[in-house]
Each structure stands twice: as C-alpha cells, then as structure tokens.
Amino acid sequence: KLRDPRLTQLGRNQAMALRSRGAELSPELVVCSPMVRALETATLAFPDLWGATQADVPGNKDEPVYGSAESKMVVPWLALADLTEVSGAHFCDQRKDVSKVKEMFPFIVFSRVPEKDDLWTVERETKLSVAQRCYEFMCWLKSRPEKELVVSTHSGFLLTLMHAVLDCQDKPLEASFV
C-alpha cells in the first residue's frame, strides 16, 4: 500500500511518449494536481517547459528529484489542490505532504495547496464533492488570462468534470468519458 505513489516505468514511458505532441503546443501555464503521479507525468511529458537539460530529464530510472529551484522556467508551473484525484478510502489517493513533494519538484509553486491532505478520509469522497472541486477549478480557469494551458490531473477528476460540470455537445467526445 503506497501513499501517493510515483509512476511505474510503464507510466514514465507513457508520459515521455507525449513529448512529441507536447512540442506542438505553446502553453503559457502548467497546472497540476499536487499528487506525485500527475506531477511526474507533466514533468516527463513537458521537460522543455521547465527548462530541463538532457541531464535533468529523468524517466528511464527512478530519479528522486525533478529539476531544481534554479530550473530555467519557460512558463510558470502551479499545483492546485482542486485537481487532486477522487480522494478517500484508497491509500494510493492520499497525497504526500507538500514539504515532501516540493523536495521532488522544487520548481513547482504549491501556494494553492495545504501542507497536509485535508481531503482524504477513510470514506470515499462523494461525487458531489468532486463535482464541486471541478466547478471551482473551471471558475478559476475562466478567470485566468492565459489562452493555452497544460492541465495534468487524474481520470476520476476528468470523468466527473465531463459528466457533472461541462455540457459536452460532441457525442463522440462525450462517449470517450463514459
């Protein structure tokens, strides 16, 4: 039972496979769930956005740290508590304390994430609670000046966002979130 586990090698490979698609984008901001697997996915998929050199880019081994506080940021990186996976009951969905995660991702700003995981309980988070977080994220997103962002979050969050918050008129797209 791992609390807020890192990606497996398969997950790291999948994240690195996104690099070519990521190179086609021009985001002005990267926002991530404060959970390690979402942060790892974003840093592996978009190393150019945090100023990584070839020596900085982990992925083929279990590196303990991504970048440094001195990383030459191309765009700001921000962790948002609202993007956390559906919480509770499953130990893997209890996030690590911010102070520990900052050690692994020193270039990411965690100012919008409480030090301790205040969402996790022994009971699974209700769909209504997740939908409220999705709604709050969309309100925050609407207030942002950026036109293109990278969002690294979790399937449970995205499923709730697509089903409970957004009105998707594209039926094939909507079907992919069932």
Image: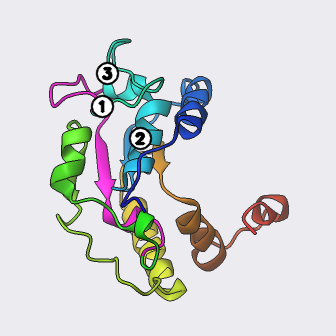
The amino acid pointed to by label 3 is Gly
Give the CA distance from mark 1 to mark 2.
8 Å
The amino acid pointed to by label 1 is Tyr
Residue located at (44% from left, 49% from top): 38
The segment highlighted magenta reads 65-87
User: Residue 68: which quarter of the image?
Assistant: top left
User: Residue 142: which quarter of the image?
Assistant: bottom left
Residue 110: x and y in percent read: 21, 53
Q: Are marks 3 and 1 in contact (CB under 8 Å)?
A: no
Viewer-proximal residue, 62 or 72? 62
Residue 45: x and y in percent read: 50, 32
Which residue is under mark 2? 40
Which residue is under mark 1? 66
* The disc label shown at residue 51, or none: 3
Q: Are marks 1 and 2 in contact (CB under 8 Å)?
A: yes
Looking at the rendered structure, the secondary structure element under dot 3 is loop
The image shows residue 73, relative to residue 161, as above or below, that is above
**Foreground disc of the pair 2, 3:** 2
Looking at the rendered structure, the secondary structure element under dot 1 is loop
Which is more N-terminal, label 3 or label 2? Answer: 2
The image shows residue 37, relative to residue 124, as above or below, that is above
Give the CA distance from mark 3 to mark 1.
11 Å
